[in-house]
Image (tube, grey):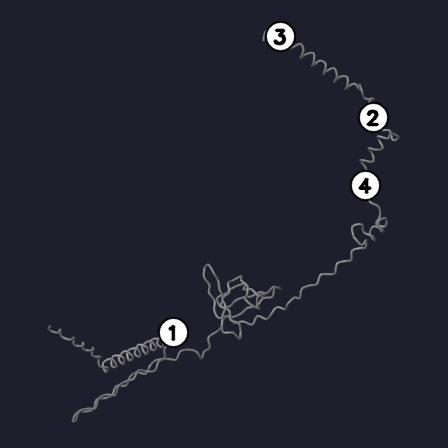
Amino acid sequence: MNLRVSRGLTLVLAGICALFLLLVVLFWFGVGRGYSWWTLDPTDDAAGKKKLVNAQYKLGSWDNFAEVNARPLFNEDRRPTPPMPPEQQADVKPIPKLDVVLAGVIITSKVRLAMIKEKGKEKSTTVKEGGAMPGELGAWSLAEVKPRSAVFKNSIGESATVELIAVANSQKPTPPPPPRVAPPPPPAPGQAPQPQILPAPAQPLPPDAAAAADLQQRIDARRQQIREQQQQQQQLQQQVPPQEAPSPMPQPLPQQQ
């Protein structure tokens, strides 16, 4: 671009800026303040149509549609639709009483279970914490499992606590009988009799030791019974003589021709 062209562009831009500055000065002194937007004439038809288009439609009162309500257009018999009958409420079954026994609990880091047994039934059911009871007691659910009890809740918010079955005192194991002591042999003639040494009285064992002793006594009795059965079987096998094998039949000799 040469110097002549650049000077021409500068003059054009300067003239445009001067024109805009002149318009600003004229508006500042009030040129054009007497002009405003043209208002619509109410008698003009075009203006009335625009007002109707912009106006919001409003329905009349319900009395104006009484005939339409009495004779519906979309019904074949032109009669009002009969009202719907009220819905019949379902029969609400009463919640049965929680008549159960807590037979045991299982508490681990991952699961909590309760062994429930209905009164009058021999079979017990295992229910997980948060699960519902089976059968007729489905309205009850196991809310919480504790070490010695279980808490149940029903559908209406009632709660019941069932304690763990306690072992009766009469079911404690009986202590083992005292050991038998063989009588001493009779003294030889001319020998003074030796004094008899009596065994010390057996001291009562604690409950845990008594239970362990009772279990050990049962195991020893069972072993003794198994030994006696084995000895009887061996004696029976010795009394029965072994069966002799049948002798082979003699084969006929070949005939000489």
Work out whether mark 1 precedes mark 3 in sequence or the reverse, and give the earlier one: 3
Q: Residue 57 carries which label?
A: 4
- The residue tagged 3 is 5
**Image quarter of the N terminus:** top right
**Image quarter of the C terminus:** bottom left
Q: Point out residue 97 in the picture as x, y percentages from the top left corner.
A: 59, 71
Label 2 neighbour load within 10 Å: few <14, some 14-19, many 20+: few
Foreground residue, 93 or 32?
A: 93
Q: Which amino acid does label 1 sit on?
A: Asp
Residue contact at pointers 2 and 4, CB within 8 angstroms: no
Closer to us: mark 2 or mark 1? 2
Which residue is most to the right? 43
- Mark 1–mark 3 distance (CA, rounded to whole Å): 120 Å
Q: Quadrant of residue 202?
A: bottom left
Residue contact at pointers 1 and 3, CB within 8 angstroms: no
Work out whether mark 2 precedes mark 4 in sequence or the reverse, and give the earlier one: 2
Q: Point out residue 101 in the picture as x, y percentages from the top left corner.
A: 52, 72
Q: What element carries label 4?
A: loop
Label 4 neighbour load within 10 Å: few <14, some 14-19, many 20+: few
Residue contact at pointers 2 and 1, CB within 8 angstroms: no
Residue contact at pointers 4 and 3, CB within 8 angstroms: no
Label 1 neighbour load within 10 Å: few <14, some 14-19, many 20+: few
- The residue tagged 2 is 38
Work out whether mark 1 precedes mark 4 in sequence or the reverse, and give the earlier one: 4
- Mark 1–mark 4 distance (CA, rounded to whole Å): 95 Å
Judge whether 61 appears above or below 248 on screen: above
Q: What residue type is labelled 4?
A: Tyr
- Mark 2–mark 3 distance (CA, rounded to whole Å): 47 Å
Work out whether mark 2 precedes mark 1 in sequence or the reverse, and give the earlier one: 2
Q: Point out residue 59 in the picture as x, y percentages from the top left corner.
A: 82, 45
- The residue tagged 1 is 208
Residue contact at pointers 2 and 3, CB within 8 angstroms: no
